[in-house]
Amino acid sequence: MFVPFSIDRWLAFPFVAALAACASGTSGPAPTVSSSAGTSGGRPASSAGGAAGGGTSGGSSGGASTGSGDAGFDAGCTPGDGGDCPFCGAANFVVRCGIKGIGATCPRHSSCGPGDGCPCDEGYVAVRCGDGGACTDSNPCQGSDWWCAPVEPGGCGALNFTVPCPDGGGGVTYCPTHASCGTAGCSGCQDGYVDESCGGEACEAQPCTYPEWWCAPRQAGPCGPQNFTVACTDGDGGVSGYCPTNGSCDGQTCGCPSGDVLANCADEPCGLGSCDEDEFWCAPAGGCGALNYTIQCPGNYYCPSHSQCVDGNCQCASGYEAYDCAGVLCSRVDGGCQAPDVWCLQDAG
């Protein structure tokens, strides 16, 4: 028996080009911090001079200061030197700031800045000893529980801001590894990378701020920005945007192969209009419900597996009948079945 059932028109989701976007007490002064001095293209840029969030550069790269220096200590001390190198905590506050008063000190690789600041040298950033979180204006480091850590390529966070870019005012700002530079700060990420927050959300969907973003490598996997691995050409040898792994480019839309359905990260079909930029994927179809809507119809709406498109509605194919997700025939449901809680099962009779 052929039972037509009405559905909302589930439109295919268009893709968008992804290449847009302490008070210290006796231990010494606080780090000088500027967490968001300038932006470019909606993407955060760091403070001029020095690593982002670590303040302006004030001393030499060897860790000497404008005070009386850190005589008697190895200025090149790093965490890799082991127990002989007290790289974080009170023992690391060896840069003496005589002009600030008796006992005032700053950590290695910083200088005695103006006021109570200890700006980290260029190539270093102020982070907490325990969790490695960045010292920022809104989340300052206290006492001696912080240090000037060397920036280096790696995971998301303050230490990954390794790319110097012009800040538009004659100075330098720092962007994450694999970032591209604009005329004033960061300008998206290089090919093969996508800008996302440390929580895995697209910076286009939710503006990212220092230090909680990075240029993540595109790679097949779960739903989200990094899964956009299919490059769509613009006809001139360039890339106009990206679609998810297993997806396909069709003009300004992304499609999925048979057996998959374009869905958001909560596995709700994008045809419902619930998918944000870079927050969808080609989800494996199956079962009753939204992910079973695998058939794309003329007019850009979807029907369940084992059905066909008929004048803006869906109709189960010959040998199949429409049931709701509770297993009741739609012909026996008061008012009929409503998408997406319907699927087509083989007729047992």
Image: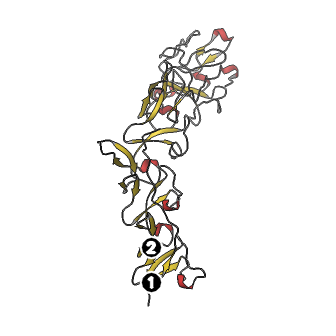
Q: In the rendered image of this protein, does residue 111 appear above or below residue 184?
A: above
Q: What residue type is labelled 1?
A: Phe
Q: In the rendered image of this protein, does residue 212 appear above or below residue 150?
A: below
Furthest residue to the right?
Answer: 25
Q: Which amino acid does label 2 sit on?
A: Asp
Labels 2, 1: front one: 2
Of residue 41 and residue 91, the one placed in the foreground of this image is 41
Quadrant containing the N terminus in the rendered view: bottom left
Q: Distance between the residues labelled 2 and 1?
A: 14 Å
Furthest residue to the left?
Answer: 237
Lateral position of residue 205 relative to residue 105, left or right? left
Count the numbered circles shown.
Answer: 2
Based on the displayed image, in which of its 4 quarters is residue 206 positioned? top right
Q: Residue 311 carries which label?
A: 2
Lateral position of residue 348 relative to residue 112, left or right? left
Residue neighbourhood size for the residue with mark 2, other residues' Cα within 10 Å, grouped as few (<14), some (14–19), many (≥20): few
- Mark 2: secondary structure: loop
Based on the displayed image, in which of its 4 quarters is residue 315 positioned? bottom left
Of residue 285 and residue 233, the one placed in the foreground of this image is 233
Q: Residue 2 carries which label?
A: 1
Residue 127 location (% of width, % of height): 57, 30
Residue 329 location (% of width, % of height): 53, 83
Residue neighbourhood size for the residue with mark 1, other residues' Cα within 10 Å, grouped as few (<14), some (14–19), many (≥20): few
Of residue 24 and residue 261, the one placed in the foreground of this image is 261
Lateral position of residue 218 relative to residue 274, left or right? left
Which circle's residue, 2 or 1, is located before the other in the chain?
A: 1
